[in-house]
């Protein structure tokens, strides 16, 4: 099973994505993800898997009207791997990231691919919307909520994320109802980042099931 990325550079037009998808389907391949950078000259990146000849597929895609160039690349999963998402207050987010990046470095040296993404946010609606959006992020495997007060709609969003997408959530020890909805709670933000990476790393001996509902 080939897993790779294909970047198509073309003049944008209605039906371009449909035609590209049709070419991929003709080869018995499956599109796992699409990223589109719009513009007069657009780039459409396709994540593809299946049993197919990549060079023949590239030649076939080059024949699509308005396509200028087609590049074969590694998939983003092979390059960036699993994603740890950290959101909340800036100071707490920075400390969580410190722990996550340090721990990810240890596992990535042993063959893992784990990346860390952050966004400092304030406001119940903004955070709730961001939590829900984690389920739509490619390769997102765990969420850390770093702040001093979170509840209300954010708590509802945390429960939806866990139930609908199966993405675990770590909460810092904070005021509000979010800690009650999270998988587990960690007081030290650096430790929270470290544990987030350990929870998704195949090279770590760590099980969320064994500590779910606990506080540290």
Image: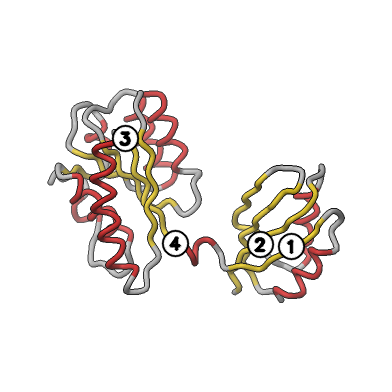
Q: Between marks 1 and 3, how big is the CA–CA gap?
A: 40 Å
Q: Which quadrant of the view contains residue 198?
A: bottom left
To which residue does mark 4 refer?
81
Q: Residue at x 35, y 50 (%)?
A: 142
**Residue 86 x/y as whole percent:** 34, 44
Labelled disc at residue 119: none
Q: Between marks 1 and 2, how big is the CA–CA gap?
A: 7 Å
Q: Residue at x 34, y 39 (%)?
A: 87
Q: Is residue 113 left or right of residue 12?
A: left
To which residue does mark 3 refer?
88
Q: Describe the element under mark 2 as helix, strand or loop.
A: strand
To which residue does mark 2 refer?
30
Q: Describe the element under mark 3 as helix, strand or loop.
A: strand
Looking at the rendering, in which quadrant would you find the N terminus?
bottom right
Which sits earlier in the primary sequence, circle 2 or circle 3? Answer: 2
Considering only vertical position in the picture, is 115 above or below 163? below
Which is in the foreground here, disc 4 or disc 2?
4
**Residue 168 x/y as whole percent:** 33, 47
Q: Are marks 2 and 3 in contact (CB under 8 Å)?
A: no
Which sits earlier in the primary sequence, circle 1 or circle 2? Answer: 1
Q: Are marks 1 and 2 in contact (CB under 8 Å)?
A: yes
Q: Describe the element under mark 4 as helix, strand or loop.
A: loop
**Residue 41 x/y as whole percent:** 75, 48
Which sits earlier in the primary sequence, circle 4 or circle 1? Answer: 1
Q: Between marks 4 and 1, how big is the CA–CA gap?
A: 23 Å
The answer to which of 73 and 178 lies nearer the viewer is 73
Q: Residues within 10 Å of mark 2 (few under 14, many from 20)?
A: some
Which is in the foreground here, disc 2 or disc 3?
3
Q: Which quadrant of the view contains residue 182?
A: top left
């Amino acid at each position: 099973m080939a897993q790779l990325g294909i970047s198509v550079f073309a003049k944008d037009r209605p039906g371009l994505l449909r035609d590209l998808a049709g070419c991929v389907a003709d080869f018995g391949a499956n599109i796992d993800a699409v990223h589109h950078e719009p513009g007069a000259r657009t780039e459409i990146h396709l994540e593809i898997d299946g049993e197919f000849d990549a060079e023949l597929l590239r030649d076939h895609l080059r024949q699509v009207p308005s396509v200028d160039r087609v590049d074969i690349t590694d998939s983003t999963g092979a390059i960036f791997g699993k994603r740890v998402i950290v959101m909340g207050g800036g100071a707490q987010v920075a400390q969580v990231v410190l722990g996550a990046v340090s721990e990810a470095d240890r596992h990535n040296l042993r063959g893992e691919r784990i990346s860390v993404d952050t966004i400092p946010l304030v406001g119940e609606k903004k955070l709730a919307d961001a939590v829900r959006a984690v389920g739509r992020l490619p390769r997102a495997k765990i969420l850390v909520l770093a702040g001093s007060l979170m509840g209300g709609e954010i708590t509802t969003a945390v429960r939806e994320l866990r139930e609908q997408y199966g993405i675990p959530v770590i909460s810092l020890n904070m005021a509000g109802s979010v800690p009650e909805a999270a998988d587990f709670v960690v007081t030290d933000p650096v430790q929270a980042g470290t544990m987030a990476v350990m929870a998704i790393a195949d090279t770590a001996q760590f099980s969320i099931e064994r500590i779910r509902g606990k506080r540290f």
